[in-house]
Image: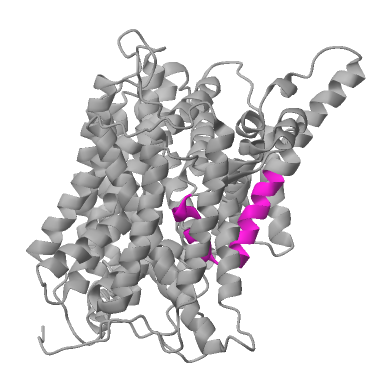
Amino acid sequence: MDNNITYEAKLPENAHRELKPGEEYVPVMPVNATFPEVTLWSVGMGLLMAIIFSAAAAYSGLKIGQVFEAAIPISIIAVGASTALKKKFALSQNIIIQSIGASSGVIVAGAIFTIPALYILQAKYPEIQANFVQIFFSSLFGGFLGILFLIPFRKYFVKDMHGKFPFPEATAGAEILIAGEKGGSQAKTLIISGLVGGLFEFVISSFHLFADEVTSRVLSIGTTLADKSKLVFHMSVSPLVFSFGYLVGLKYALIITVGSFLSWWIFVPLINEIGDIVVTMMGSGVNPIQAMSPEDIFRAYVRPIGIGAIAMAGIIGIVKSSSVIGSAFKLAVAGITGGKKDATVADATPRTEKDLKMSTIFLLAILVIGAIFVFLLFGVDITPFQAVVALITLVVISFLFTTVAANAIAIVGSNPVSGMTLMTLILSSFVLVGAGLSGPLGMMSALVIGGIVCTALSMAGGFVTDLKIGYWMGTTPVKQEKWKFLGTLVSAATVGVVIYILGQAYGYVLTPETPNPLIAPQANAMAAVIEPLMLPGAKVYWILYVVGALLSLMLNFIGIPPLAFALGMFIPLGLNTPLVVGGLLNHFLGKPSAKKPEKVAEARIARGTLISSGMIAGAAIFGVIGALLLFFGFDLNLHIFDGNEVGAETLALVAFILLLIYFVWETKKAKEGD
């Protein structure tokens, strides 16, 4: 390493747009120079972050059903620590810290969606096992598969598709790292916006000073529409969500939100109306749907349509990416059989394009798959034939859905792992029942498969963010890839301990021994889905999944991205509507006019990106603080609006409008050349 090497701490102008013919992207750190990436400091800090954030995220997810994304607050901490210690070449080391530490959030997201369902079902079926070994190995093997299956697609997602995907989460992370490296006014803007977003989020989640979302029920006519016609509007006021909308942009924000409107404003009231029509045709009786809330109708009947749409969108994506998948196989074969040729090519490859050798990936994949087989055989206690069937199912689904998870993160920064995991549980249950595995043992097997697949997909989505940040900055991918395994190991162990301890201390089911269980909403949903699938004669409404699948096919036919639309159908309405708010801000603030020259518009877009990144970071990091306070028994709920939802939502709307005014005012400070 040459200590005299310098570089400008600024993302190039073409970092976020498609490249022109013959144009190349030049990363922040020079390609022909080497930097201290893997050091005792970066690895030690990364592992510490993995432990802390794994514990905090697991508790938060099981307590309130929300898993915060760890990558952004870890980036903030890394920047702050390296600045305080005056580390030289901090950028390259901070990326490794962020990459190792970010294993925590993705492992937690994979684990808590499925594994606690073992405890939930164990209360009814004592023969189902739930222990640390199952939690740890499901998380570990799933994380390893996610890493190994994504690496062959790294070049496609981070380089070949440069500028075609918005990568909102990676954009936020990159802006934080750059601002920390650059310091000055950018760092100040990032810190102030982070404090604004963080304190706003803290007031909502910890003090409960006002509601976390606004609904149409705040008006009497809205309550009537919700009760009678099942029409309802939800909008989260979290600065994190609308900031994501700003980074995603108006195009994708609209597609996602229109998908959500289809679910909530067409399918939900339509299902209720069909119930009325049936009762009218019969001449007597009561419409059972009328007693359900719009939210209940969505969860019971409409969300499965969204799951089917996501599954088909994934299949469409796999078909469209078949050439990429084929290239990955060819590279793997060449790496395995090429020997010296593979090494020669690796030596000639620029530092910023070096991945793990395909021969190494293949060997590691075989070892992990073999270990999973042993785990299924002895850890789940099924027959060798059933273990083979289960193994093939989870490996095929994990590999094929890897590109779907990465694609989703690249588009909206949100990974639909719960939807894909539900589809995995349905498919694996169907296959396992065919292999003679049903009842409690079948439930346990399907949930373990679902846990491995869910973690693999969560890891693939999270890791593509790390690799995109590395691509923008100019780090060495192979170093990120190697040390990601260690972060996964530490995170899996931490998550295993936390889930096991919380299960013993609080439980996940209401019993005399556990009077205040953790709600674990995703795991409860998984348990509810898996139980009837594994019981003889249970009714599964396959037509709902088929409707979603057909919808995705038609959307693809008319040129609308089916995955973005399907994500909108599946994700709750309140988390989608703020995306349009952010997208509209991006559109109008960055639109040139007679009074706003193109250079000024570009400066505003850049400043808005920085402010959005700060708000996302602040909301995430204050979410961690709130989760830790709850963990240690500090309940800061002021109980001001208990029983007064109208007052809580009205104040939330006023606060959200003030937040938007601040955002616009701060963004308009940008000047040409900023």
Where does the image place residue 391, in percent across and percent down from the top left?
Answer: 39, 38
Decide whether the magenta segment is chiefly helix, strand or loop: helix
Left/right placement of residue 426 relative to residue 380 reads: right
Colour setting: one colour
Magenta span has 44? no
Quadrant of the image containing the N terminus: bottom left
The relative height of residue 339 versus residue 659 in the rendered view (above or below) is below
Left/right placement of residue 9 relative to residue 160 reads: left
Residue at position x 78%, y 36% in the image: 270
The relative height of residue 299 versus residue 468 in the rendered view (above or below) is above
The relative height of residue 224 versus residue 659 in the rendered view (above or below) is above
Pick the front one: 533 or 192: 192
Where does the image place residue 595, in percent across and percent down from the top left?
Answer: 61, 87
Left/right placement of residue 577 relative to residue 469 reads: right
How many callouts does the rendering have?
A: 0
Pick the front one: 557 or 614: 614
The relative height of residue 644 versus residue 559 in the rendered view (above or below) is above
- To which quarter of the image does residue 132 belong? top left
Q: Residue furthest bottom?
A: 22
Where does the image place residue 620, in percent across and percent down from the top left?
Answer: 35, 52
Q: Is residue 374 visible?
A: no
Pick the front one: 634 or 97: 634
> Which region shows up in magenta?
238-263
Pick the front one: 576 or 380: 576
Q: Is residue 427 visible?
A: yes
- To which quarter of the image does residue 291 belong? top right
Residue at position x 51%, y 68% in the image: 664
Quadrant of the image containing the C terminus: bottom left
Where does the image place residue 214, in percent across and percent down from the top left?
Answer: 58, 43
Residue at position x 46%, y 25% in the image: 527
